[in-house]
């Protein structure tokens, strides 16, 4: 899955984002990078640079993670969802580092100046339409991108236990969807 067509696809997405930044493309770029980290493949230089620049800025100002990664603006998810995604990204970091969920909620609450119940609500919130924890899963992709995490078998077990879904399931849905939507970019 790491061939010239994939790398060209990523380059085209980064170019499109550069000329017309929007939240949808920003989320796709995050998920494309996460795809590589889950599969242990190498992203394009352009995608890596796009992520690195934003990750460095987000590490200095976690409260502005959604803004830094371009997830805000016209066509964005509601502000509360963006807040949840940002909180979830940092909560996932604690969980992937083997913290139990309550410790992760407490650590993330301190980081964001809120209470652990608010973090827990953000992390466990289900999408009302599909009953899935979409904001938690997007937060996982953002976490992987911010912290440049190579997903291990242990991480896979943690994700499965937390989301009741293997990490590859949503990843492949997103991968297929992105190519269906943007595969004709030139």
Image: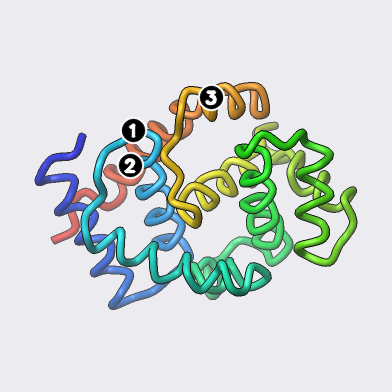
CA distance separating discs 3 and 1: 14 Å
Q: Which of the two labelled residues, at mark 3 and mark 2, occupies the earlier sequence position?
A: 2
Relative vertical location of residue 78 with respect to residue 141 in this rendering, above or below: below
Query: Which class describes the residues within 10 Å of circle 2: few (<14), some (14-19), or many (20+)?
Result: many
For image coordinates 14% across by 54% down, the residue present is 8
**Residue picked out by circle 2:** 36
Please provide percent x and percent y for residue 60: 58, 73
Report helix, strand or loop for mark 2: helix
Report helix, strand or loop for mark 3: helix
Please provide percent x and percent y for residue 151: 45, 34
Query: Which class describes the residues within 10 Å of circle 3: few (<14), some (14-19), or many (20+)?
Result: few
For image coordinates 82% across by 60% down, the residue present is 110
- In-image side of 53 versus 114 (left or right): left
**Residue picked out by circle 3:** 154
Q: Quadrant of the N terminus?
A: top left
Label 2 near label 3: C-beta < 8 Å? Answer: no
**How many numbered marks does the figure carry?**
3
Seen from the viewer's position, the closer of residues 129 and 28 is 28
**Residue picked out by circle 1:** 39
Q: Quadrant of residue 159?
A: top right
Q: Which of the two labelled residues, at mark 3 and mark 1, occupies the earlier sequence position?
A: 1
- In-image side of 118 versus 134 (left or right): right
Label 2 near label 1: C-beta < 8 Å? Answer: yes
Q: Quadrant of the C terminus?
A: bottom left
Q: Nearer the viewer, mark 3 or mark 1?
A: 3
For image coordinates 12% across by 45% down, the residue present is 5
Please provide percent x and percent y for residue 115: 90, 56
């Amino acid at each position: 899955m790491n061939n010239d067509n994939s790398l060209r696809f990523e380059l085209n997405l980064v170019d499109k984002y550069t000329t017309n930044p929007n939240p949808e493309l920003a989320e796709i770029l995050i998920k494309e990078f996460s795809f590589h980290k889950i599969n242990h493949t190498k992203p394009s230089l352009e995608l890596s640079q796009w992520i690195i620049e934003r990750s460095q800025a987000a590490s200095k100002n976690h409260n502005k993670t959604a803004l830094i990664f371009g997830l805000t603006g016209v066509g964005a998810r509601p502000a509360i969802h963006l807040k949840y995604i940002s909180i979830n990204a940092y909560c996932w970091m604690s969980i992937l580092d083997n913290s139990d969920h309550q410790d992760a909620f407490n650590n993330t609450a301190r980081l964001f100046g809120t209470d652990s119940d608010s973090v827990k609500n953000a992390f466990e919130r289900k999408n009302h339409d599909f009953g899935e924890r979409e904001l938690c899963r997007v937060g996982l992709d953002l976490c992987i991108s911010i912290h440049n995490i190579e997903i291990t078998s242990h991480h896979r077990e943690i994700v499965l236990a937390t989301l009741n879904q293997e990490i590859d399931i949503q990843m492949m849905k997103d991968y297929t969807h992105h190519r269906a939507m943007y595969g004709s970019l030139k």
